[in-house]
Amino acid sequence: MSATRLLGPGRESSRAQDTLVIIQVSLAVVLLISAGLMVRTFVALQRVELGIGSIGRIQTARIAVPGSPDQVIRTHSEILEQVRNIPGVESAAFVSEAPLDGGRRAWDAVCIDGQRLVGTRIPPIRTYKSVSPGLFDTMGTPLKAGRDFTWTDAFEKRPYIVVSENLAIELFGSAQAAIGHRAGACGARSTHAEIIGVAGDVHGKAVATAPPAIVYWPPFFDGLYGPGDIRLARNVALVVRTKFDQGEGFATQMHQAVSSVNKSIPLGSIRSMQAIVDRSLAPTSFALVLLGIAGAMALLLGVVGIYGVIAYSVARRRREIGVRLALGAGPASVKALFVRKSLLLTARGIVFGLAASAGLMHLMSAMLFGTEPLDPVAYSAVPSILLGAAALASYLPARRAAKIDPAIVLRSAD
């Protein structure tokens, strides 16, 4: 005799429904844990110290200044002075590439105290940035030791540099120990400059990546790779700190400030630092939304499936329920019978889902930050949510079963 006849069509259908519910719950576990890990990642990214203070009050824009080196430096200085005169502006400065802006970066090896390249061994590559005096104050980046550049340093072309704290610690053991040492490019004819300051670490490429080791060069430097090798910051990002969040009219005021110095200088890419940070977080935010939607849909399907299975079970077992009630079973025990079944199905789905998640979440490790693929918070919260949802989904049909009149059921069976 076939298995179908032994079980009967109702029993086979019930098993198929149970299996479908277990699969739905398992899928919901995987998607909800994925969404939970992305939530934990997003929260961790929001808490990262970027090395920038009061991000919401910083505006950036790009300018490119033509002319001779002396003209470029003076034009930059005059533009910054005009920008500082805008109502509500606290300070202004420029940098060759703003943090997290995703533009082209300058980089090279760094040698210290007269050190040169020996043989084929190449020192680690560092980020190079040209900055104006006042940048660190404008960005809210603290100076850990020493001092910032001054415009006198820039106009007199003094061979000074500032380095990031992580580079100072790596090369000299501490921020204070770096002050007074000389460093520069590793070429045989390169001019080494005196380290006059150490700035706090600033995230450069992305929020989720470690802050790079940075050498900050003055806006004009002669001899980076040899006498006469002039490095001049022409195309730079203006960085402006305001006393309060600026509206759309601020862009017009910026254009007017630049035009008052030189009408031929274009001003573009006007953005707030908050917008730049948000763009850096956009991939994580997008993945979080997608996984959240998928997880919510899977949870909904699982709840609907549990409700359907329990409702079908109640309808199929009406006579059994009537007999139980007639023999003295209380409504609470009848409710518990069906709620227990829903919790059992959910528990099975959770077990399979947790096992699948443990294997699959390692594939997401590259997207995670500040949390582990086997994060205990996510792996404990999701089963609790699903068990609670299953109990609620089964309560309505279970309560309906407890209200069955045994007399009516038994008479109809006759």
Image (tube, helix red, strand yellow):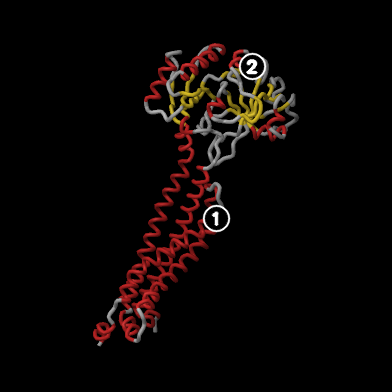
Drawn side of residue 129 relative to residue 291, left or right: right
Instruction: Provide residue 87's location: percent of width, then percent of height.
Output: 42, 21
Q: Which mark is residue 270?
A: none
Q: Which secondary structure lies at badge 2?
A: strand
> Where 89 sits versus 205, above or below?
above
Q: Which secondary structure lies at badge 1?
A: loop
Q: Residues within 10 Å of mark 2 (few under 14, many from 20)?
A: some
Residues at marks 1 and 2, CA–CA distance in whole angstroms: 52 Å
Callout in the foreground (1, 2): 1
What residue is rendered at 65% in x and 14% in y?
228
Residue ID for mark 1: 375
Instruction: Provide residue 226's location: percent of width, then percent of height.
Output: 67, 18
Quarter residue 263 falls in: top left
Q: Earlier in the sequence, mark 1 or mark 2?
A: 2
> Where 395 sits versus 131, above or below?
below
Q: Residue furthest bottom?
A: 414
Instruction: Provide residue 35's location: percent of width, then percent of height.
Output: 46, 52
Q: Residues within 10 Å of mark 1 (few under 14, many from 20)?
A: some
Circle 1: residue type: Asp
What residue is rendered at 46% in x and 68% in y?
347
Drawn side of residue 301 relative to residue 409, left or right: right
Circle 2: residue type: Asp
Residue ID for mark 2: 222
Q: Quadrant of the N terminus?
A: bottom left
Q: Nearer the viewer, residue 405 or 379?
A: 405
Q: Quadrant of the C terminus?
A: bottom left
What residue is rendered at 53% in x and 52% in y?
363
